[in-house]
Each structure stands twice: as structure tokens, then as C-alpha cells.
Image (cartoon, helix red, strand yellow):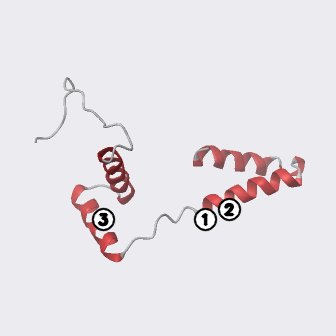
Amino acid sequence: MTRLSFAEELESAADRIAGMSRPDLQIILRRAALMLRNVAGVPLEAATEDALDAMAAEMKLGRSDLIQIVLRDWLEANACLPVHTIDEESETEGSA
């Protein structure tokens, strides 16, 4: 379940709270608590945080975007994900 669909489910529950059973309400509140608990992310060492922030600024990316790129590249390099291929026929911006 995505965060967006879960948020919509929470809003729907709020609209019909009088008609919800106590167990259903407990389930949805526990799921909300679990999602909120997991929002903080992964604690990193200070040197790693600094390197990520510097690289994100240099690449003009958000920190979470950079982390997604690095993680995907690492997973591809270690054969945990299929390698992302570039279509040779497509046009790209920039230079190599």
C-alpha cells in the first residue's frame, strides 16, 4: 500500500468514524503509527550525511533522490536488480 492510498484510507475512515467498528479503527490507527514510526529514515554517520549533502548539492538533486540513485546503482552492480539499459536510439541532453 502506498502512502497516498493509505492517506486516502485514513481520510475516508475519518469521514465515517461513527460507522467504523472498534477493531477496524484500531487496525488503521496501528498501521498509521507504524508508517509514522518508519518515516525518520535510516540513521547515518555524520561523515556519510555530509558527503550525501555535498554530492546532492553538487548534482543539484534532493537528498532523497540521490539516495535512490545510489541505492539503485548499488543493487544493480551487485546483481540484486536488473541493469537499467539506455535506449541507444533515444536523444539525451548533456555531454559525456
| Residue 12 on image: x %, y % | 74, 45
Q: Few, some or many C-alpha atoms within 10 Å of disc 2 (few <14, some 14-19, many ≥20)?
A: few
Secondary structure state at the residue bearing disc 2: helix
Q: Identify whether 85 is placed above or below 55.
A: above
Q: Is residue 6 left or right of residue 87?
A: right
The residue lying toward the viewer, choosing from 63 and 42, is: 42
Residue 82, by quadrant, is top left
Name the residue located 38 percent from the left edge and 41 percent from the top edge. 81
Q: Is residue 60 left or right of residue 39?
A: left
First reached walking from the N terminus: tag 1 or tag 3: 1
Secondary structure state at the residue bearing disc 1: helix
Disc 1 + disc 3, Cβ < 8 Å: no
Disc 1 + disc 2, Cβ < 8 Å: yes
Name the residue located 30 percent from the left edge and 65 percent from the top edge. 52
Q: Which mark is residue 37?
A: 1
First reached walking from the N terminus: tag 3 or tag 2: 2
Q: State the residue position of label 2.
A: 33
Q: State the residue position of label 3.
A: 52
Q: Quadrant of the C terminus?
A: top left
Q: Identify whether 46 is placed above or below 6.
A: below
| Residue 51 on image: x %, y % | 27, 68
Real-space CA distance between mark 1 and mark 3, rounded to the nearest whole angstrom? 23 Å
Real-space CA distance between mark 3 and mark 2, rounded to the nearest whole angstrom? 29 Å
Q: Is residue 52 left or right of residue 15?
A: left
Q: Few, some or many C-alpha atoms within 10 Å of disc 3 (few <14, some 14-19, many ≥20)?
A: some
Q: Quadrant of the N terminus?
A: top right
Amino acid tagged 2: Ala
Amino acid tagged 3: Leu
Disc 3 + disc 2, Cβ < 8 Å: no
Name the residue located 27 percent from the left edge and 33 percent from the top edge. 85
Q: Identify whether 60 is placed above or below 47.
A: above
